[in-house]
Image (cartoon, rainbow, N blue to C red):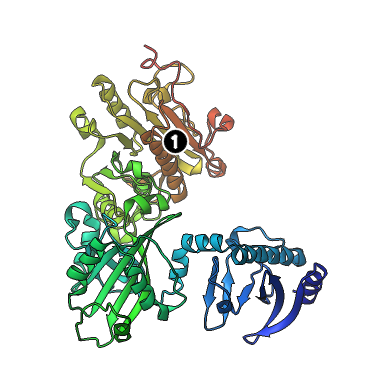
């Protein structure tokens, strides 16, 4: 990239720009006057522009603490956050304009921070955690904190005992917290820790009056903010926490900011590793302690579930999934990943070697019951889901006292005969639970899901009206492959016939099914509906298979449409 042209262009725009060398690297240097301050911005040269050109503030210590900057004390530079750089579409074809635009944004931000102290302080407090994280010099990963109140309480803090997974995280919970009842997932993790827990506490701060520049400022910062605590909290801290003799103390703070409640912490460790001491409350005492700033992440469903794009309002829902094969396995995982709180799995089959390339479960679950494998896999992946495995089949569930317990039943067994028999039972016994039937067609042509809501027009039989004679049919009118064709393959003799479709087809069918289920459970879909996805017909045509007229005319892939068929004898009695 021709930086000489960039320098000339910026000079033509009125900027004081020159080539320079910083930290043994080629740079360009821009000098700007803002109010009474003269600032120098440094850009390190790059071979090509892949994101917004970045500039660093030189000598940040000579200015007041500025919002949206992060100091690197070893290099006497501070980064400036003007945007999430990768999210901005940059004019890389014309680098001169990209640099002009970026430099303008950097200067505008610094001008606001330097000329409006009140706004700068407000922004500093709003982004306090970013400043705190810059002090994080810990050797461990996340500190996962389970709390039920922001008020003062004593904590048990479990040190990490591994390099990866939750074993690599510090685990924290209140001293008298009922883990078994409230957080069984967390209890399992804590039970695996071999070392005795350290002592910690929560301190709710009324406000923040300063922000530490570096780790050496932490003792003074702590004492300054300790004095801001209300008398009751301060008394509890001194009498129930600080007088205990320990080698390690943890203090976890919380503060209300305009962005919400922020959590952050300090770890105090006495330098003589085998000596226990009371908590230091005088500035001179801190010389005997190592202090580490640490980030705190709450192990809390109300924040983690929506942060991952899932839904807290599904936590009290209970779904019965019948069929845990290639489609059902992915439905189970997708439902859990969306925040479902309770899932019952029904299947009597075990995972076979033939299915490992299109099943959710990996090969280590070979010969295991699919329901049990899914239970373990899902509950170790998602903390707040209760999965109940059950050995059985669809027709054994013809008991309205059982199936009416659920908010929704999903049937993913790919057996139209059994599904119609079960539907007959539900109609006869006025079952109150909505039911989704889902299936994948072979050769990648598509998949379908139908939602049958009791007391609403539209039922499973609507999807089985024969389009030619308008009577009840034996195959679904949603299908893309014509009936009475040999659709199965057989690679190794009798008993091993299978319907050929890929893992991608199974996932796609699972996705439309889960989407339909979520929309029903959240009250967004209130009428019986159907949804299909349409794939390529190439593999089917290569096998000389015939496709239905619906395949040719279908143009509403992934869209929910009414299930009601005007010729259905059940819905139009």
Left or right? Give the position of 102 relative to 225: right
Residue at 31% over, 74% down:
267
> Measured from the top left, where is residue 503 in percent x and y?
44, 50
- Residue at left offset 41%, top offset 36%: 519
- Quadrant in which residue 517 is drawn: top left
Q: Sort mark 1 into few (<14), some (14-19) or many (20+) by Cα contacts within 10 Å.
A: many
Residue 138 in view here: no
Q: How many marks overall? A: 1
Residue 370 image offset from top left, x and y in percent: 27, 50
Q: Secondary structure at mark 1?
A: strand
Q: Is residue 133 above or below residue 519?
A: below
The image shows residue 264 at horizontal and vertical percentages of 37, 66
Question: Camera-side residue: 115 or 563?
Answer: 115
Image quadrant containing the C terminus: top left
Q: Dividing the image into 4 quarters, which one contains the N terminus? A: bottom right
* Residue 57 higher or lower than 232, as above or below: below
Nearer the observer, 85 or 275 = 275
Residue 521 image position (x, y, % from top left): 36, 35
Q: Quadrant of residue 101?
A: bottom right
What residue sits right under mark 1 in the picture? Answer: 448
Tell me what residue is drawn at x 47 percent, y 62 percent: 125
């Amino acid at each position: 990239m021709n930086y000489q042209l960039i320098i000339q262009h910026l000079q033509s725009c009125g900027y004081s720009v020159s080539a320079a060398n910083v930290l043994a690297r080629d740079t360009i240097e821009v000098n700007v006057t803002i109010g009474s301050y003269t600032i120098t911005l440094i850009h390190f040269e790059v071979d090509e522009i892949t994101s917004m050109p970045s500039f660093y503030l030189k000598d940040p210590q000579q200015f007041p603490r500025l919002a949206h900057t992060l100091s690197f004390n070893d290099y006497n530079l501070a980064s400036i956050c003007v945007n999430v750089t990768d999210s901005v579409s940059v004019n890389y074809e014309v680098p001169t304009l990209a640099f002009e635009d970026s430099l303008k944004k950097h200067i505008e931000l610094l001008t606001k921070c330097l000329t409006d102290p009140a706004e700068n302080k407000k922004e500093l407090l709003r982004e306090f955690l970013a400043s705190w994280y810059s002090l994080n010099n810990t050797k461990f990963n996340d500190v996962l904190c389970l709390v039920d109140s922001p008020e003062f309480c004593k904590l048990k803090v479990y040190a990490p005992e591994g390099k990866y997974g939750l074993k690599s995280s510090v685990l924290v919970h209140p001293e008298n917290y009922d883990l078994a009842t409230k957080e069984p997932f967390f209890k399992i993790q804590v039970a695996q820790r071999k070392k005795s827990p350290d002592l910690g506490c929560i301190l709710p701060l009324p406000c923040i009056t300063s922000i530490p520049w570096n780790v050496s400022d932490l003792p003074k910062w702590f004492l300054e903010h300790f004095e801001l605590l209300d008398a009751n909290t301060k008394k509890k801290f001194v009498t129930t926490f600080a007088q205990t003799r320990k080698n390690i103390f943890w203090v976890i703070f919380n503060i209300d900011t305009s962005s919400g409640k922020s959590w952050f912490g300090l770890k105090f460790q006495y330098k003589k590793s085998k000596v226990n001491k009371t908590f230091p409350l005088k500035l001179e005492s801190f010389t005997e302690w190592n202090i580490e700033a640490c980030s705190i992440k709450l192990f809390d469903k109300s924040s983690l579930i929506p942060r991952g794009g899932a839904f807290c309002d599904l936590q009290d829902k209970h779904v019965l999934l019948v069929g845990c094969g290639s489609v059902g396995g992915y439905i189970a995982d997708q439902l859990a990943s969306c925040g479902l709180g309770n899932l019952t799995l029904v299947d009597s089959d075990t995972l076979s070697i033939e299915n490992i390339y299109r099943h959710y479960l990996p090969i280590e679950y070979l010969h295991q019951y699919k329901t049990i494998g899914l239970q373990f896999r899902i509950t170790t992946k998602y903390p707040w889901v209760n999965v109940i495995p059950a050995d059985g089949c669809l027709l054994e569930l013809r008991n309205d006292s059982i199936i009416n317990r659920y908010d929704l039943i999903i049937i993913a067994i790919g057996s139209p005969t059994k599904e119609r028999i079960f539907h007959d039972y539900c109609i006869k016994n006025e079952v109150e639970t909505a039911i989704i039937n889902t299936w994948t067609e072979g050769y990648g042509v598509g998949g379908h899901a139908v939602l049958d809501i009791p007391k609403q027009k539209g039922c499973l039989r609507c999807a089985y009206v024969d389009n030619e004679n308008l009577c009840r049919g034996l195959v679904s009118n949603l299908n893309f492959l014509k009936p009475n064709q040999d659709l199965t393959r057989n690679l190794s003799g009798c008993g091993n016939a299978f319907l050929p479709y890929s893992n991608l087809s199974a996932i796609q069918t699972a996705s439309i099914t889960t989407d339909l289920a979520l929309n029903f459970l959240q009250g967004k879909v209130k009428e019986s509906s159907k949804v299909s996805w349409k794939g390529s017909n190439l593999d089917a045509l290569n096998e000389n298979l015939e496709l239905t007229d619906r395949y040719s005319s279908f143009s509403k892939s992934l869209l929910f449409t009414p299930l009601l068929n005007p010729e259905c004898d059940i819905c139009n009695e």
